[in-house]
Image (tube, rainbow, N blue to C red):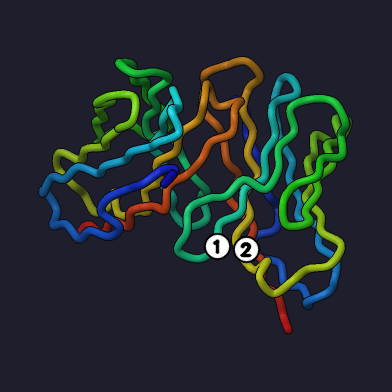
Amino acid sequence: AQSVTQPDIHITVSEGASLELRCNYSYGATPYLFWYVQSPGQGLQLLLKYFSGDTLVQGIKGFEAEFKRSQSSFNLRKPSVHWSDAAEYFCAVAPIGSARQLTFGSGTQLTVLP
Amino acid sequence: NAGVTQTPKFQVLKTGQSMTLQCAQDMNHNSMYWYRQDPGMGLRLIYYSASEGTTDKGEVPNGYNVSRLNKREFSLRLESAAPSQTSVYFCASSRTGPGETQYFGPGTRLLVL
């Protein structure tokens, strides 16, 4: 069965600093890959997704993620964090061409210091 | 265009009571989903509906039932609520299967005493 690991439960960065959130997956083949963000009391919003092609994916709000097949990773990055980026971030995977469920990681809580 | 809407936003139940969580989408999506979110566990799929008239169990279906009323609406029912069902429930929809982007509602916070 597929699984998603987000090894960092909580990350704290200063405003203006760079950010990298880690995501590793376990799956038999390359799945579809997603990053979602959840602001307090809100639903999940899609930041970006990887289906195929260029392994560096650009998303909304200045985020990007790089798919590395050899490492089974899909890390999320942002060069300069804003206070409004404080939220919880979820990595998720889904099988290609299947109606099976999206599997989420347990999330990384991001705190941004002024 | 409201996207995915959920009612109610918050509910308190006593053990053994029943209730139905409502979800509607106006994006003409075929697939709809119900998830629960618990601290430190991410989101887990309860049930999903790949198209109108079909439903399938997800990872944690026990204690829940669903109805795909029409293409727009997908409800989740707790027949006899238990404290273990205290959670935040999210509905989502997508154009086809999970490989397509899922759009989420704002969630329903449920407390079972």
Secondary structure type for disc 2: strand
Q: Nearer the viewer, residue A57 or B71?
A: B71
Q: Residue at image x 78%, y 77%?
A: A14
The percent coordinates of residue B83 (x first, y second) are: 24, 54
Q: Which mark is residue B89?
A: none
Q: Residue at image x 33%, y 53%?
A: B108
Relative to B35, is A10 on the left or the right? right
Same chain letter for marks 2 and 1: yes
Farthest-out residue, front: B1
Farthest-out residue, bottom: A114
The percent coordinates of residue B43 (x first, y second) are: 49, 45
How crowded pointer 2 is (Cα within 10 Å; few <14, some 14-19, many 20+) is rated as some
Which chain does the numbered disc 2 sit on?
Answer: A
Q: Which mark is residue A109?
A: 2
Amino acid tagged 1: Ser
How crowded pointer 1 is (Cα within 10 Å; few <14, some 14-19, many 20+) is rated as some
- How many callouts does the rendering have? 2
Which chain does the numbered disc 1 sit on?
Answer: A
Q: Which residue is mark 1?
A: A39
Q: Residue at image x 52%, y 25%?
A: B95
Relative to A54, is B32 on the left or the right? left
Amino acid tagged 2: Gln
Which image quarter is the N terminus of chain B in? top left
Where residue A82 sits, quadrant-wise, is bottom right
Relative to B82, is A38 on the left or the right? right
Relative to B68, is A63 on the left or the right? right
